[in-house]
Amino acid sequence: MDKLLEIINGKHKLKELGSQGFSGLKVKGMTFTMNSYEAEGLGYVSTMVAKGFFGLLRMDTLIINPIVIDLPLFSYDRIFAFGKDKAMLEFYDTMVEKTSLDKLHPIKEKNLKYVFTEEAKPAWYDDVRLPETVSYQGKKADTETFDEICREYYKTFLEIDAPKVTDYDAKAKKIDYYVDGLLNNGGPATDVFVQKFGKEKTTELFKKVLFLRK
């Protein structure tokens, strides 16, 4: 996680904004540490680390929510569980203009042996989840390789030539469609927070920390 933040900070200076009091939440045996940042010339970045089960389970999340330049929302989830390692790199269409993500394709092509494909089921986000979304799955021995793959995704993502956002309202509506979709339709992570804290507090967490846009 720290190395990924270093990559972002190297191109877009990060200003820490904090967790708005949400860090340290305990849910189902997991402790959540959260933070958010303003990324100069890019938008907002948030992190969430969950640890539990005596160190046998750890989940890292890092979200880039671009609002200054017209890139898609980029959500990274890494799950270390009982000797297994899974990295999920998801891209959601919050773009006003259709910036090409072709630069990301070679990363997947050269690491196909680690790509994990799940049975596709209809979901509310199908119309905004971009085809560049990919998951890698392996064992603890693959962690160093997965670290390098993820770093390459971040470096390449930040090198994509995207125009500056000129219609902020249109951009904001795209972001809200995705975030409100999570809150209204639920999902594994969303449901855990809603069940523990209720929808109102979960909405505050999502909109003030994880998917911040001012």
Image: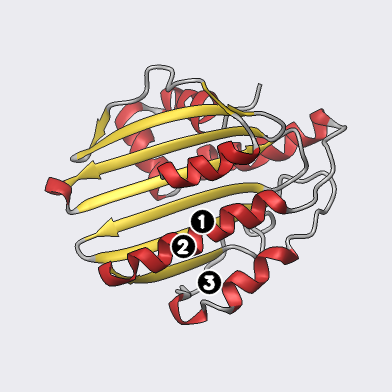
In the image, taking residue 106 as reference, residue 199 lies left or right, namely: left
Q: How many marks?
A: 3
Residue, far top:
21
Q: Residue type at mark 1?
A: Arg
Q: Residue type at mark 3?
A: Ala
Q: Residue 148 shows which numbered tag? A: 2
In the image, taking residue 199 as reference, residue 123 lies left or right, namely: right
Residue at label 1? 151
Q: Position of residue 51 (x, y in %)?
A: 24, 43
Q: Position of residue 125 (x, y in %)?
A: 61, 54
Can residue 124 be seen? no
Q: Residues within 10 Å of mark 1 (few under 14, many from 20)?
A: some
Residue at label 3? 120
In the image, taking residue 29 as reference, residue 207 lies left or right, namely: right
Residue visible at 46% across and 62% down in the picture: 148
From this view, report whether residue 124 is shown above or below residue 84: above
Q: Nearer the viewer, mark 3 or mark 2?
A: 2
Residue, far right:
166
Task: Give the Cα distance between marks 3 and 2.
Answer: 27 Å
Asked if the residue at tag 2 contacts the one at tag 1, i.e. Cβ–Cβ closer than 8 Å, the answer is: yes
As helix, strand or loop, the secondary structure at mark 3 comes to loop
Q: Residues within 10 Å of mark 2 (few under 14, many from 20)?
A: few
As helix, strand or loop, the secondary structure at mark 1 comes to helix
N-term mark: 1 or 3: 3
Q: Position of residue 208 (x, y in %)?
A: 52, 23
N-term mark: 3 or 2: 3
Q: Nearer the viewer, residue 103 or 60?
A: 103
From this view, report whether residue 13 is shown above or below residue 152: above
Task: Give the Cα distance between marks 1 and 3.
Answer: 27 Å
Q: Residue type at mark 2?
A: Glu
Asked if the residue at tag 2 contacts the one at tag 3, i.e. Cβ–Cβ closer than 8 Å, the answer is: no
Q: Quadrant of the C terminus?
A: top right
